[in-house]
Image (tube, helix red, strand yellow):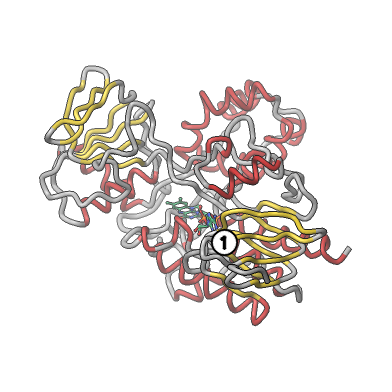
Amino acid sequence: MRAGEATVRSGVVIVVGGGFSGALTAAHVAARGLGCVVVEPGELGRGLAFGPAAEGLLLNTPARLMSALPDEPDHFVRWLGCAPGAFAPRVAYGAYAGATAAALAGERMVHVRARAIAVERDGAAYVVACDDGSRVRGRALVLALGNAPPRAPAPIDPAWPEYRADPPAAPGDEVLVLGTALTAIDAIARLRGRGHRGRITAVSRRGLVPESYAGAPPGEQVPSGRDAIATPVSVPAELVARPSLRALIAWWRTAGGDAAGRAAGVRAAAPAIWRALPADDRGAFLRHVRARLDLVRHRAPPALRELVDRGRAEGWLDVVAGRVAAAHRTGDGIAYRIGAIARTARWIVDATGPDRDLARSASPLVRDLVARGWVVPDPLGLGAITGARGELGAPGVFAVGPWRVAAVWESTAVPELRVQAAETAAAVAAYVRA
Ligand SMILES: Cc1cc2nc3c(=O)[nH]c(=O)nc-3n(C[C@H](O)[C@H](O)[C@H](O)COP(=O)(O)OP(=O)(O)OC[C@H]3O[C@@H](n4cnc5c(N)ncnc54)[C@H](O)[C@@H]3O)c2cc1C
């Protein structure tokens, strides 16, 4: 150990990032008999989605789809003791993911509570430098850095004190929410839950709000078997093998079933379709189709969708289509303009979703990895270029989680990530044992 180095820890495998993807990947590695060190500043299994920032918010997926273990579909329902169709608290899910990872891993998983700031190579090993001065050494490295905070769209300045993820809004404060998808609905629900009664303006390019889980009665239950996962409409094999955006849209219009079923069919075939889709079509999909598909692919718990409808009917929620064309600080907040609308908001909540463009990442670790060429940002801003098993640009370095959206499209939700965690652990184990 060199002078000034607080600690050096060693595991065969280092996992950086201990949200759902990192914690479960590390646990599967440990369950395969390999020592594993997870570098994560917070509790394991939480991350952005299921940590303290999600206090008071619900999962947007019924509990019966949220098992962390691919082979035990009712594992989460049994752990929580809830109805299969319930939308469980997100912080409870974080506790579940952490506990499940710990139980799976046993003694072989070590948690270093720190933030990784750089990685270097030392012969066949990788050495991760952490912000507490410690260093972690291992033969393989898994990057599970997940969801980066949203990037404030111009002309909003993220340095403005009114720009907050969770503002301390007084009951009468006017709030501008950037985005109208699930994160925006969460923000609206949180404000109302804390007694906010002022006007909320929510804006997105098209001003569209996610659909509700079909067939659910009022409240937070979905009858078993009545959601998109249960009734997929399959995309024909020849279209999966040779897709074009035009042909997929034509299929969508004529395939029958309901939209949620068609979205489930697309989800099931997404990795193959995305891989084979011509590059121009991928770009066109992001610009013209994605937002509409997301309305049915990422649906809202019925209670939250009802809140949006009630807010619009009662006049305290204004959902508008457009973009913030001008904004500046005044003594009272942020004066902004969207088309003909000119208002002043006391607070701005950015619900535009995680920024997946690694080329403009503010993380010192990501910048270091990009500079070394070990991480190559996807040109469409969808994470990193990876191999079929998550391989990055140096031997024994893998990505798991949302960074793999560029390769498989569906790489953000638990049903896909629980499989990816187990498969990545197998790939990492094969690498170190080769
Ligand atoms: C608000 C929200 C709600 C969601 N709700 C659902 C849902 O209801 N159902 C569902 O299926 N999916 C949901 N998702 C999808 C969710 O992202 C995934 O299910 C999953 O949580 C992603 O986990 P992850 O570990 O890949 O990323 P993250 O959860 O983002 O975890 C990344 C981790 O990396 C750590 N990290 C970052 N940089 C460093 C560093 N330099 N050093 C060390 N650690 C670092 C962070 O601290 C963090 O813990 C939701 C996502 C969001 C954002």
* 161 and 178: which is toward the camera: 161
Residue 85 is situated, as x and y percent measured from the top left of the image, at 44, 62
Residue 37 is situated, as x and y percent measured from the top left of the image, at 64, 69
Amino acid found under the numbered disc labelled 1: Cys
Residue 181 is situated, as x and y percent measured from the top left of the image, at 39, 40
* 78 and 414: which is toward the camera: 414
Residue at 77 percent of width and 33 percent of height: 241
Q: Residues within 10 Å of mark 1 (few under 14, many from 20)?
A: many
* 213 and 409: which is toward the camera: 409
How many discs appear?
A: 1
* 191 and 314: which is toward the camera: 191
Residue at 74 percent of width and 55 percent of height: 121
> Is 10 left, or right, of 210 in this rendering?
right
- What quarter of the picture does the C terminus occupy? bottom right
Identify whether 241 is placed above or below 118: above
Residue 345 is situated, as x and y percent measured from the top left of the image, at 19, 35
Q: Quadrant of residue 375?
A: top right
Residue at the bottom extreme, as displayed:
107
Residue at the front extreme, as displayed:
3
The answer as to whether callout 1 falls within 8 Å of ligand 1 is yes
Residue under label 1, please give it. 130
Residue at the top extreme, as displayed:
340
User: Which element is circle 1 on?
Assistant: strand
> Is 311 left, or right, of 382 in this rendering?
left
Work out whether residue 234 can be spotted: no
Residue at 34 percent of width and 55 percent of height: 217
Identify whether 49 is placed above or below 329: below
